[in-house]
Image: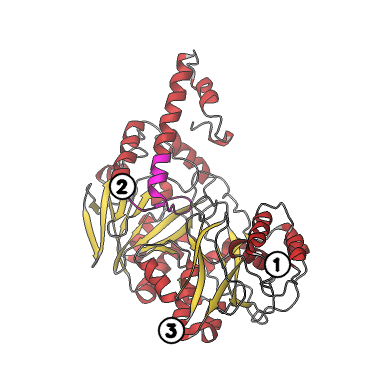
Amino acid sequence: MAATTLYEQVLARVASGPLVPMPPPRASASVVLWRGDGADLEVFWIERSPTMKFMGGWHAFPGGGVSKRDADIEVAGEVEGVAGAPVAAGMPESVLDEVGELEPILAPGVTAAALRELFEEVGVLPGLEESATSDRLLELREASIGRRLEFREVVAELAVGLDASRLVYAGRWLTPPLGPLRFDNRFFLLEWPAAEPIQPTADTVEAVGGEWIRPREALARWKRGEVLTAPPILHLLAVLDEQGVVAGRERMRLPEDANLGPFRLVEFRPGVVLLPVRTPTLPPAAFTNCYLLGTGDAVLIDPGSPFEREIDWLAEAVESAPRTLGRRVREIWLTHHHPDHVGGATALRERCGLAIAAHAATARRLEGQVEVDREIEDGERTSLDDGFTVRAIHTPGHARGHLAFLHEELGSLVAGDVVAGFGTIVIDPPEGDMQQYLETLERLEALAPRTLFPAHGPTVLDAAGKLEEYRRHRLWREVKVLAAWRSGLQKPAEIRSEVSEDLAPMAFPLA
C-alpha cells in the first residue's frame, strides 16, 4: 500500500527501523484477603480510585508497586508455597518473549511491598493489635501513602513486627504490553477471619470502596458488566469458586489454564479478548491491540502485525479458541486501512481460511494489497451469539473508511484509532478530516458506550469522559490555532511552536 499521507510516510519509516524497546515491568505485589470455607468463602476486594494512573476505577485486590525503600525493610518469616514454584509461573510464550529473564519470585522488597500496600489500602497488618485507634490508623495510612512517613516509621509507631509467614504464594502475572506502565505482580493469599481485631476498610485516597464478597458473586458482577477487573483477578476468583483455597493453590501458582495459545487470556469485558501484537506503529506505542470479539461465533479485529512470529501466535490463538473458550472465529474485521491494523490480515486469511470484511472506503484503499471479501455498512448489526450483538459504526476522521464496533448489550466499544489509551490521534488530511472526527466523537458520545477498547494503549473504563476529553482537547487547540493566526503567525512551523508546546518533539512533524 503506497504511503499517500504524511502519517503513512511516518509509519513506513517506522517499519524500516528498529523496534521500539519495551520498558521493563515494575515489580509489584497484591494480597488476597480471604475468610470462611466452601459456600461461605469470601474475599476482600477494592474499587480503585478513578484518579489512579493505573487501572483507576477498576476492581482489584490490595496491592501496588515495589518502591526502592521496600528492599531495606526487614520482614520476618517465610512465605508458604514459593519453594519449588517456577519463576515463569505458567506464563505464555508471547509474555516471556517481551520481558527476557525474570527476577526471583521473592525479589528484594516484594514481601515488604505486599504488607505495606495491604496496610495503606485497607488498613490491616498481621499482628496489628486493636489498641491502635481507628483515627490514628487512618492518619498513619495517609502519611504512608503520601510518603510523609516512611513505612518503617509507621511500623515502629504501631509496634508491630512485619511477618510474612501467614502469606501463601498464589501466582505471578505480568501486565500485558498495553502501554509504558507495566507490572510484574506476585499474588499472595492471607486468611483474615472475622475474629481478627481489625477488619479491612477501603477509605483512603487510593481506594474508594471495598467489600467482602463471595468469588461467585464477584464473577457474576463482572459477567453482567457491573465491574471491570484484570485477568489475574478473574482467574483467582474462578479457582477459589471452583476449588477453594487449599485445593486450588497449585492452579493459582501455575495458571496455565489462563492462556489462549501463546497469549495470556486478557478479557476485561465478557466477549472482548485482547491480543496485543508487535507492530511498526507510531511511538510511543509499540503494539496494536488485536481483538477476538464474541462469546460463541467470533471475529478477529485488526490483526495488524506483519511479523511472522506474531502472525504464528495469532493463528495459534484462533485455532485454540474453540477448545479453550468455546469460540469459533468466522471472519476478520478491519477498522481501517493503515498498515499497523492490516499487516497480518492476508497471512491469517490464508492460514485460517477466514474472509476479510471492512468498510467500502477501506476496501478501495487496500485494492491490490489486501483482498476484502465483504463490505461492512454503517449501522450493520451482527449477532455473534444469543445476547451478543455487534453494531458497526462508521467513524471517519482518522481515516475515511474507519469503523468502530459496539457490543450493544454491555456497551463495549472496539474503537480502533478513534481514541488511544494514551496520547492522542493523528488527523492527517486528505485522508483525515477534523470536522468529521469531531462529528464522530459526538456521535459516539450519543451512543453512550461504557468501555472503550482502543487499538493502542490500555482499556478505558470511563468512555463518556474520554470522548468528551478528546472533543474538548481538539476544540481547545483549534482556538489556539486561530489565535496564533490572528496574532500574525501564519507559517505552519510558527503556529506549531505556539499551539503544540504540550507535544513531544518527535510528534512535531505530524503536528
In the image, what residue type sits under mark 1?
Ala
In the image, what residue type sits under mark 2?
Leu
Q: Position of residue 133 (x, y in %)?
A: 66, 65
Q: Secondary structure at mark 2?
A: strand
- Which one is earlier in the sequence, the residue at label 3 or at label 1? 3
- Of residues 22 and 339, the one nearer the viewer is 22
Residue at 73%, 57% (x, y): give it: 68
Range of magenta residues? 448-469
**Residue tagged by mark 2?**
403
Q: Position of residue 326 (x, y in %)?
A: 33, 74
* Label at residue 190: none
Residue 86 visible? The answer is: yes
Residue 262 visible? The answer is: no
Vertical position of residue 230 compared to residue 448: above or below: below
Q: Position of residue 458 (x, y in %)?
A: 48, 53
In the image, what residue type sits under mark 3?
Ala
Mark 2 closeness class: few <14, some 14–19, many ≥20 residues within 10 Å = many
**Distance of mark 2 from mark 1, alpha carbons?**
47 Å
**Residue tagged by mark 1?**
112
Q: Position of residue 63 (x, y in %)?
A: 59, 64
Label 2 vs label 1, nearer the camera: 1
Residue at 41%, 57% (x, y): give it: 290
* Label at residue 39: 3
Task: Describe residue 434's horizontal placement relative to residue 123 as left or right.
Answer: left
